[in-house]
Amino acid sequence: MDMLLTKRLLTFDAPLMWRIQPGECGQALAVCDQLDMSIQIDAGTPAQQDQQIAEALTLLYDDLNDSGELEQFFAHYGIKVTIRDSILKPSEISVAALDVSQPTAEVGT
């Protein structure tokens, strides 16, 4: 069975802005006033914080997309989002195998 893999690109107008509020015990709070949202993250480097925010938003986007509420969610906050889907080329696809035969699994590519 052939299957097409797609990549979804969301563009926000205006871009979502996040500010980091330091916390205690190695934690921080990422706040997006535009979405009235906060996410607890680890207090790491700016790049690590950006990655954690991106991962949390990906989960949110996936849930909203699966429920058919993606555009409605952002419209509620007055944020215009443009959604573009593109078909991935075979060279853009990477496959990872998960070894579940051991108590602690490793991911290999």
Image (cartoon, rainbow, N blue to C red):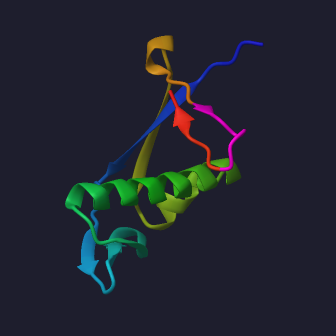
Vertical placement of residue 13 versus 99, above or below:
below
Task: Name the residue furthest front.
Answer: 102
Instruction: Give the residues drawn in magenta, as a range.
Output: 97-103
Residue at image x 50%, y 21%?
A: 93
Q: Position of residue 78 (x, y in %)?
A: 41, 63
Task: Name the residue furthest bottom.
Answer: 24
Q: Which secondary structure type mostly characterizes the magenta part of the structure? A: loop
Residue at image x 52%, y 31%?
A: 108
Q: Position of residue 49 (x, y in %)?
A: 30, 62
Count of numbered circles in the view:
0
In the visual, does 4 lie left or right of 49?
right
Task: Name the residue furthest right.
Answer: 1
Q: As rendered, which of 91 and 44 lies closer to the eye?
A: 44
Place residue 1 in its image quadrant: top right
Q: Position of residue 100 (x, y in %)?
A: 70, 40
In the visual, does 1 lie left or right of 12?
right
